[in-house]
């Protein structure tokens, strides 16, 4: 080092270190917030997809309800533990749907034409909401005695509403022409915008859809 040059003083080094620390902290905070927002948005998208999957699967089965070209004894709808809500709607959280749509071939997955029974897969389908902590799930089985399998997780509640062809609430299986589907969804992660305001909130919403029985239209 030349005699005319001098190094950094201790104070200068401390100031530089402090500035670097402040900048690093600000960048870390920004990156953390960005990561929280990314995770929260993915969580929201997944919750929405879960609700839509539930509605699509229920709708596809409801459309076939009561299909019975061979006159087999069947019950198009069974509303388990149904009740009347504040608007006098007929509501349940578990619904069984019967139809004769396949079974004339021997394949285990249920194929072919209607065969006069409701023993093949997808001819006796049950959907139900199973509560859990902190969130529940929608479960389904495709035969009367088969095991229930989850089809959508992180669901807060599911309600099935039954109506006749005139739009009136009904619990009579033979009269049901429409099933209203209501899915309450809640994210699993806290809303980062609410957290920034010191609030502990989740994003929640309800998706609704109507499924129509094809033979009743």
Image (cartoon, rainbow, N blue to C red):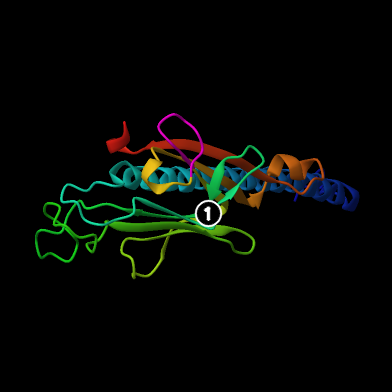
Q: Quadrant of residue 41?
A: top right
Q: Please tell me which residue is depicted at 40% across the width and 66% down the height of the picture.
A: 148
Q: Is residue 167 magenta?
A: yes
User: Most prominent secondary structure in the magenta stretch?
Assistant: loop
Considering every residue shown, the one lying at the far left of the view is 105
Q: Nearer the viewer, residue 142 or 13?
A: 142
Q: Against 207, is 96 above or below?
A: below
> Horizontal and vertical percent for residue 12?
86, 46
Q: Please tell me which residue is depicted at 43% across the width and 48% down the height of the picture.
A: 54
> Horizontal and vertical percent for residue 4?
82, 43
Which stretch appears magenta? 162-170
> Horizontal and vertical percent for residue 194?
74, 41
Label 1 neighbour load within 10 Å: few <14, some 14-19, many 20+: many
Q: Is residue 69 magenta?
A: no
Q: Quadrant of residue 178?
A: top left
Q: Please tell me which residue is depicted at 88% across the width and 53% down the height of the picture.
A: 10
Q: Can you identify the residue that label 1 sits on?
A: 93
Determine the secondary structure under disc 1.
loop
Q: Quadrant of the C terminus?
A: top left
Relative side of 78 to 118, left or right: right
Q: Against 122, is 60 above or below?
A: above
């Amino acid at each position: 080092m030349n005699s005319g040059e001098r190094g950094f003083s201790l104070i200068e080094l401390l100031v530089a270190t402090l500035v670097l620390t402040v900048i690093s902290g600000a960048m870390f905070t920004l990156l953390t917030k960005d990561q929280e927002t990314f995770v929260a948005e993915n969580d929201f998208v997944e919750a929405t997809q879960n609700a839509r999957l539930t509605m699509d699967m229920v709708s596809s089965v409801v459309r076939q309800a009561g299909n019975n070209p061979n006159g087999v004894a069947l019950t198009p709808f069974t509303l388990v533990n149904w009740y009347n809500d504040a608007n006098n709607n007929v509501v349940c959280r578990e619904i069984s749907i019967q139809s004769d749509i396949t079974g004339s071939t021997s394949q285990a997955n249920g194929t072919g034409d209607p065969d006069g029974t409701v023993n093949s897969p997808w001819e006796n389908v049950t959907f139900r909401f199973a509560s859990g902590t902190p969130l529940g799930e929608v479960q389904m089985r495709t035969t009367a005695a088969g095991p229930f399998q989850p089809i959508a997780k992180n669901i807060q509640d599911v309600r099935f509403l039954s109506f006749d062809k005139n739009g009136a609430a009904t619990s009579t299986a033979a009269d049901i022409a429409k099933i209203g589907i209501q899915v309450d969804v809640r994210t699993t992660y806290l809303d980062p915008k609410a957290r920034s305001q010191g609030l502990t909130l989740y994003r929640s919403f309800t998706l609704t859809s109507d499924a129509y029985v094809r033979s009743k239209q």
